[in-house]
Image (tube, rainbow, N blue to C red):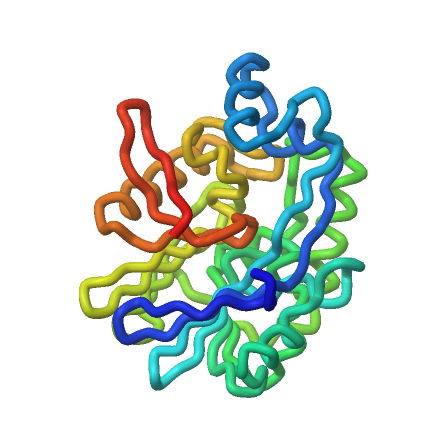
Amino acid sequence: MKKGFLHFEIGGFRCTLIADGKHAYPNPAGLLFPGAPVDELAGELARHGISPDNWPIWMSDYTCLLIDTGKQRILLDTGAGDMLPDAGLLTKNMRAAGIAPASVDCILISHAHPDHIGGACLFPEARIIMNRKEWRFWTQNPELPRLPDEFSHLLTGMVTSLLAPLQGRIELIDSDTEIAPGVNFFEARGHTPGHMALHAASSGNHLIYVGDAVIHEAHIRNTHWSPLVDVLPDKSVRTRTRLLTQAADTNAVFFGFHLPHLGRISRTDTGFDWKQR
């Protein structure tokens, strides 16, 4: 997105991808594909133009999604705010796209990782909706046994500091919820215990936003490779498969917060693939 935003339509819904920026992650193979067989991983990375022997940094996109139903403006995730040097561009790019931040009616939080909730304070008048399991997990001494202690403590501290000012503002939901006619926010557990995804449908057209249920495009062909940051890796595999199946069956436009572009999912003899829209 050279302009920092991209408009597109899903039936009668006007949608906009809005770039929050990027972030550099070290040791990407270990972070994204821990335990993946070396030969299989090398072959998959080669498909994406990546040398497994020379991949010290993953520059991840941070991209939020806004859905304008005509009656509501619904924002999916809020970016990193002022936490990171190369992110926090959400409101700037919203304005460039012709969208006033104050016009956002509702914010849906896929999960409480800092890169998704860091900008929530920039929308003081908007409703904020999150899964109750997610709130409880992060506010009741969460355990992150798959992460190194230093990383775990850093992440937990950041989430706690970002959630504290939002207490009392966040509306907690216990199950799948229709946010507006045709716009459904539903459970997609695994990456975190209360992770949510979104399905929007209008005039026979479909959109699925998966948050971090699919972090890298290589996870589409390899649903069984769970990133190190997935709290419940077995559940994340099942969730990823379910979301990809739904996207393929409905020919949905498919997007995730860290993915580089919109795409559509197709079935293959071995699973799934995607093509840029």
Query: Would residue 202 appear left or right of 134 to someone viewing this image?
Result: left
Query: Would residue 271 appear left or right of 257 to someone viewing this image?
Result: left
Q: Nearer the viewer, residue 87 or 242?
A: 87
Q: Which x, y percent locates residue 123?
A: 61, 80
Residue farthest left in this picture: 204
Which image quarter: residue 197?
A: bottom left
Q: Nearer the viewer, residue 217 or 178?
A: 217
Residue at (60, 25) in percent of width and height: 34
Residue farthest front in this picture: 2
Relative to 4, say whether 250 is above or below. above
Q: Quadrant of the N terminus?
A: bottom right
Q: Which x, y percent locates residue 132?
A: 48, 60
Residue at (41, 72) in percent of width and height: 67
Residue at (67, 60) in percent of width and height: 21
Relative to 172, say whether 245 is above or below. above
Which image quarter: residue 35?
A: top right
Q: Which x, y percent locates residue 61?
A: 61, 52
Q: Nearer the viewer, residue 161 or 64?
A: 64
Relative to 201, say whether 244 is above or below. above
User: Would you say residue 213 is visible in this rendering?
Assistant: yes
User: Would you say residue 175 is visible in this rendering?
Assistant: no
Q: Nearer the viewer, residue 253 or 72?
A: 253
Q: In this figure, what is the number of numbered marks?
A: 0
Residue at (39, 82) in percent of width and height: 72
Q: Which x, y percent locates residue 7?
A: 45, 70
Which image quarter: residue 62?
A: bottom right
